[in-house]
């Protein structure tokens, strides 16, 4: 996420006379979005019929159709799709080309998953998205008939979610090819946070409610200890009683949470000014 923000700033500084746009929020943090706006880097909620300048593809990626639409509108696309997301797209394409029934484990409305699906569907009509065995059951007949299933997973998903889907598929498919495409840094962050939670009365997860990796982190930790998910230090007062009654408090954050936001939370807790 930091790479995307720094690259967008560099693009603007190197092209001061060119408009620079980002399709969708570059990062799920309003402070960062406001900073980018102040530098002249505007957020597009949709692609206009005509445009000019640079249009940044954010880390979630986009479908080939959307990228083509950006070009046709008159923008110069600059692709900042996360390398891990690119790998998922490529793996989904490979599985589709090889004739597998492709299952994408993730939330169907998430931008990353939308782009992965669109790339796979260029090569096959047998592509579905599911986040649970229950969601897959409506495709059980087609999966059994196809026999060969290829699985990829949204980079910020929980490993337990992937495991539950694979366990179900094992019972109905003859052959399964599973690509664990969960981002390694996300997996490590979740693992470290779990260990932290075991020693804590309360864990405070800092980051946007729109961020998939942050919300998944909070979901995992809630199964271990008391956990609250806040976007910034101003929300600490909502949990004043819980914080004051907790002896061991740990703080963790999503990958997209800026360091200064985390530091403000830490400082307010240390000062006891909640």
Image (tube, helix red, strand yellow):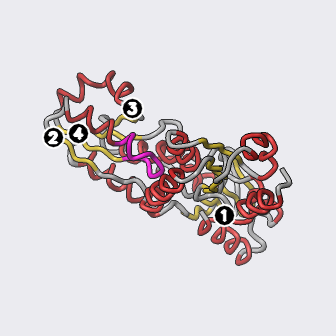
Query: In front here: 32 or 247?
Result: 247
- Drawn side of residue 214 relative to residue 143, left or right: right
Q: Residues within 10 Å of mark 4 (few under 14, many from 20)?
A: many
Disc 2, SS: strand
The residue positioned 66% from the left and 63% from the top of the image is 54
- Residue carrying label 1: 54
Q: Which of disc 1 and disc 4 is earlier in sequence?
A: 1
- 154 in magenta: yes
Sequence-wise first label, 2 or 4: 4
Query: Is residue 91 shown above or below 218?
Result: below
Q: Give the residues in magenta.
A: 153-162
Which residue position holds label 3?
132
Q: In terms of secondary structure, where does tag 1 sit? A: strand
Name the foreground residue: 183 vs 25. 183
Furthest residue to the right?
273
Picture disc at residue 24: none
Which residue does the image show at 30% across and 40% down from the upper left? Answer: 102
Sequence-first disc among 2 and 1: 1
Determine which quarter of the picture holds residue 183: bottom left
Q: Which residue is mark 4?
A: 149
Q: Are marks 2 and 4 in contact (CB under 8 Å)?
A: yes
Q: Which residue is mark 2?
A: 175
261 left or right of 153 in image:
right
| Mark 1, other Cα within 10 Å: few <14 / some 14–19 / many ≥20 | many
């Amino acid at each position: 996420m930091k790479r995307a923000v720094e690259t967008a700033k560099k693009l603007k500084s190197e092209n001061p006379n060119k408009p620079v746009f980002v399709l969708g929020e570059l990062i799920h943090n309003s402070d960062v979005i406001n900073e980018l706006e102040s530098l002249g880097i505007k957020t597009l909620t949709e692609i206009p019929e005509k445009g000019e300048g640079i249009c940044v593809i954010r880390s979630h990626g986009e479908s080939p159709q959307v990228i083509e639409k950006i070009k046709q509108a008159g923008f110069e696309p600059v692709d900042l799709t996360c390398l891990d997301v690119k790998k998922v797209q490529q793996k989904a394409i490979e599985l589709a080309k090889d004739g597998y029934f492709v299952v994408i484990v993730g939330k169907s409305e998430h931008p990353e998953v939308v782009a992965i699906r669109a790339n796979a569907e260029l090569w096959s009509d047998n592509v579905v998205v599911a986040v649970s065995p229950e969601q897959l059951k409506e495709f059980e007949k087609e999966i059994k008939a196809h026999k060969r299933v290829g699985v990829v997973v949204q980079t910020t998903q929980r490993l337990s979610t992937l495991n539950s889907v694979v366990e179900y598929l094992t019972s109905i498919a003859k052959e399964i090819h599973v690509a664990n495409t969960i981002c390694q840094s996300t997996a490590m962050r979740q693992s470290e946070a779990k260990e932290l939670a075991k020693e804590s009365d309360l864990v405070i997860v800092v980051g946007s409610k729109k961020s998939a990796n942050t919300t998944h982190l909070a979901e995992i930790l809630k199964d271990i200890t008391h956990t609250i998910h806040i976007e910034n230090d101003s929300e600490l007062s909502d949990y004043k009683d819980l914080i004051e009654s907790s002896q061991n408090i740990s703080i963790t954050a999503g990958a997209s949470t800026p360091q200064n936001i985390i530091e403000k939370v830490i400082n307010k807790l240390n000062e006891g000014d909640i």
